[in-house]
Amino acid sequence: MNGVDGLKLERTARWARRLLMPRGGAQEAGGELGVGYESASPGSGLGQADISAIASRLASARTSKGETVSRTEAEGLARSLVADARRGLEKLEGAAEGVLGQPEAVALEAVLLTRGRPAVKVMGAELEDINAYPESGMWAQLVDDHRANVMAVTMATAAVRVTDTLLTDRQWVQGTAFLIGDGLAMTNRHVLFPPGQGTRLARRLPGTTNARMKGEYEVLLDFAFDSGARRDLTYRITGVPFVAEDADPIDAAVLQVEPVAGAAKPLTVSKNSIFDIDRLFIVGHPGRVGNVPDDIFAVFGEPDERKRVSFGTLMDMVEPGQIHVVHDASTIGGYSGAGVLGFATAQVRALHYWGDSVSGNRAIASDALRAHKVLGPMIP
C-alpha cells in the first residue's frame, strides 16, 4: 500500500495523550499505565528526556551505518521532533479526524517509539535486540518468557508481495496476512481493495462475497521477508472465498493458498475475548513511507516492508460487545492485515486494520470475526 497513506492512517490520539500528557492533565478512557509498567515514563509530558532518547537513537543508527553525527546535530533534530510532537498533542485536543500534518504525526511516533513502544526487526528465527530501544526492558522480558509463542506468530505471518507481470520492475508489499488453517490465510479487505489510488488486486464476483485475483499481478505470501538470511518460504493465492462487502464493518478477507516453497504452521483465531489481555504484540510488514527525511527515518530504523514485531497495550472497552478495539502499539507505515496477540498463547485476539488521528490504532476483535455470519464458519 502507499506508504504515505499508511503513515497518515496509522495515527494516535487517545493513546498518544495517555502516554504523553503530563500527569494530572486530561486523560481519556483507559487511564494511564499502571504501576509496574516499565514504559511508565508516560504521563511525564514532553521534554529533555525525550530529546536525549531520540538523539541517542539517531546517533546509534548513524553509527551502525559507519557514519558519524555530532551530539549537537543529533539533539537539534531531536528538539525539532519534540517541538512538532508537542504541537501535535495540542491539535489533538478535541480534534476531528485527520487533523495532524505529517511532520506532527511522525514526531509523535518518534517520541512514542522511545517511550517503550518499539517495533523490532524479525531476523529469521530471532528478533533484534529489544533492549536497543529505550524503555523496552519489560517487552524484552516478556519475549524471553514467551519466546515460543512470539516466534510461532512471526513464522505464520507473511508479507503480501505484489509483482506487476507487465511492468516487472514494479514490486511492492501491499499488506500482511497470516495462516489460519490448512490452505487458508486472513488479511484485510482493503489489502485486496485499497481505497483511493491503490492497486486493486482482485475483482468481486457479483452477488457474492467471493473474489477473483487479477491475472496481471503475481501475489505471493512471503513468510521469509524479514531482516534475516535470505530464504524461500512462499505461498501463492489460488482463490478468495471471502472478502467483506464495502459497507461491512468487518474489514477482513480469507485467501485460499498453497505452498510454493516450504511450509508454515497456521495460527488459531481465539474464541475468547480480547479484553482478557492487557499487553499485546503485532507482527506485520510496515511499508516504506515517502517524503520523510532520512535522519528522521533513522529514529525508526527505516521501515522497509520487512517483518517487524510491535508491542503495546489494549485500551479499555467503551461499550459491551464492541467490534473494534484500540491499541497503542507503534504501526508506522501500516500493519494492515496483521494479527494482534497476547503473550500467553499464540492465538490471534484481533485483526489490525487501521488507525486515525483521533481514535488511535484499531483492530477487529476475534469474537467479532467468528460471529460474522459468512466469515465465521470459514474460520477453523
Image (tube, helix red, strand yellow):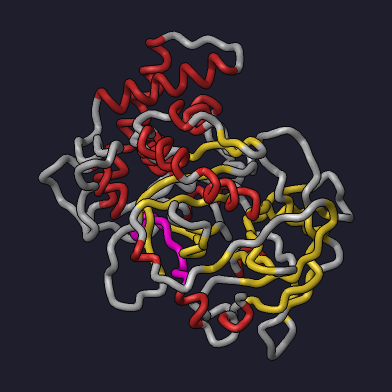
Foreground residue among 92 and 367: 367
Segment tinted magenta in the rendering: 356-366
Q: Could you tell me which residue is drawn at 38 percent across and 25 percent down?
A: 54
Is 362 drawn above or below residue 66 in the view shown?
Answer: below
Image quadrant of residue 235?
bottom right
Whether residue 256 sits left or right of residue 70 in the image: it is right
Q: Position of residue 210 (x, y in %)?
A: 71, 81
Is 130 drawn above or below residue 175 in the view shown?
Answer: above
Whether residue 197 sits left or right of residue 20 in the image: it is right
Q: Answer yes or no: is residue 344 visible.
A: yes
Q: Is residue 24 magenta?
A: no
In which quadrant will I find the N terminus? bottom right
Q: Could you tell me which residue is drawn at 51 percent across and 62 percent down?
A: 348
Q: Is residue 359 magenta?
A: yes
Foreground residue among 329 and 201: 329
Q: Position of residue 249 (x, y in %)?
A: 48, 76
Residue furthest toward the right?
166
The rendered magenta stretch, by its main secondary structure, is classed as strand
Foreground residue among 98 and 335: 335
Is 214 drawn above or below residue 198 in the view shown?
Answer: below
Residue furthest toward the left?
24
Q: Could you tell me which residue is drawn at 39 percent across and 48 percent down?
A: 312
In which quadrant will I find the C terminus? bottom right
